[in-house]
Image: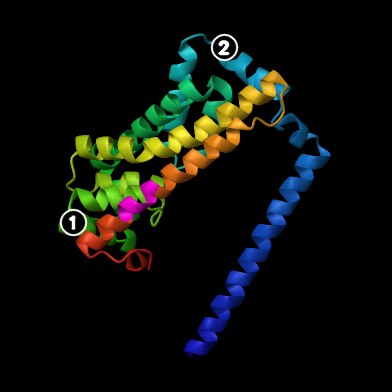
Amino acid sequence: MSNKNDEKKGKGGLIKLVVVVLIIAIVFAIAHFTGLTERLALNAENIEAMEAFFAGFGLLAYLIFIGIYILVAVFMLPAFFFTIIAGLAFGPFIGAPLALIGATLGASVAFIIARYVARDSIVNRFGNSPLFKKIDDGLRVNGVSFLILTRLVPVFPYNVQNYIYGLTPIKLGTFTLVSLITMAPGAVIYAGMAGLMRDSLMAGEGFDPMLLVYLAVAGVVLFLVSLIPKYIAKKKGIKLEDMSE
C-alpha cells in the first residue's frame, strides 16, 4: 500500500514540476515576444527611467520605497528583488540602508500583526503547523540563539518566520534588533553589488574590475557569517538537518 502511495506522490511531484516548468517557459515566451524583456533589461536607459521615477518624489521617495518594502514583507513576497532595486535606483550607499530599514520594519510590522492585530487568523493559519511547533520549541529551549540561527539559515521561509515569531513569547524589541543585525550583511552585499553595476552601466564603462574585488570581499563576509549558525548549532546541540524535516 505504501509503495502505491509513494508512487502516486512521485508522479504527482513530477506532474507539478512539469507544470511549473511549462508556466515559466510560457511567461518567458510572452515576455520575449511582447518586448517586455527589453524594457526590463539592465541597461543605462532603464536605470535612468527608474531614477527619474523616484526623483519625481524628492526625499519622499525614500519613504515610498521603505513603504513598498514593508508591504513586500507583510504580503510575504520575495524581498531579494527589491534589495537589488534599492541598489540600482539609489546607489550602493543609500540603497543598502533603505533596503535594510524597509526589511527590518516589514518584519516587525508582520510580527505586530501576528501578535496584536490578527492573532486569531495567524493562529488558525500556522498555530497547528509543524513549522510553528519547531520554532516555538526551539525558542523556548535555546532562547535568542535559536532566533539568530533561523534568521541566518534559510531553513524556514523567512517571511513566514515574521508571523510565527509573533505568536511566540519573544519580545518585539529583541526580534527587531536580531532581524536588523542578521539582515544587514545581505542588504549591504546585494544592494552594494547592484549599485556598483549601476555605476558602471551609467558611466558606459562596461564591466568594472572593482566588482570582482567587491564580490571577493562579499564572499568572505558571507562565509564568515555562515559560520555563526554552525557555531550556535554546535554549542546548543541543534541539528540543522532535523530542523528542515
Above or below — where is 1 with respect to 121?
Answer: below
Q: Residue at x 65, y 58 (%)?
A: 20
Mark 2, other Cα within 10 Å: few <14 / some 14–19 / many ≥20? some
Residue of label 2: 55
Classify 21 as above or below 70.
below
Q: Earlier in the sequence, mark 1 or mark 2?
A: 2
Residue 36 makes an appearance in the image? yes
Residue 126 placement (x, y as % from top left): 33, 55
Q: Amino acid at mark 2?
A: Ala
The C terminus lies in which quarter of the figure? bottom left
Task: Work out whether 118 lies above or below 7.
Answer: above
Secondary structure of the residue carrying tag 2 is helix
Q: Secondary structure at mark 1?
A: helix
Q: In the depicted view, which residue is nearer to us: 36 or 94? A: 94
Describe residue 38's horizontal placement relative to residue 175 as left or right: right
Q: Rounded to the nearest whole Å, what is the CA distance between mark 1 and mark 2?
A: 46 Å
Colour scheme shown: rainbow
Is 180 situated above or below 122?
A: above
Specify the segment rendered in magenta: 224-229
Q: Residue at x 57, y 22 (%)?
A: 89
- For this orientation, the residue located farthest to the right is 33
Badge 1: how crowded within 10 Å, few (<14), some, or many (20+)?
some
Mark 1: which amino acid?
A: Asn
- Residue 221 in picture, x, y percent from top left: 42, 42
Per the image, the residue denoted by label 1 is: 142
Q: How many marks?
A: 2
In percent of width and height, residue 235 lies at 21, 60
**SS assignment for the magenta stretch, majority:** helix
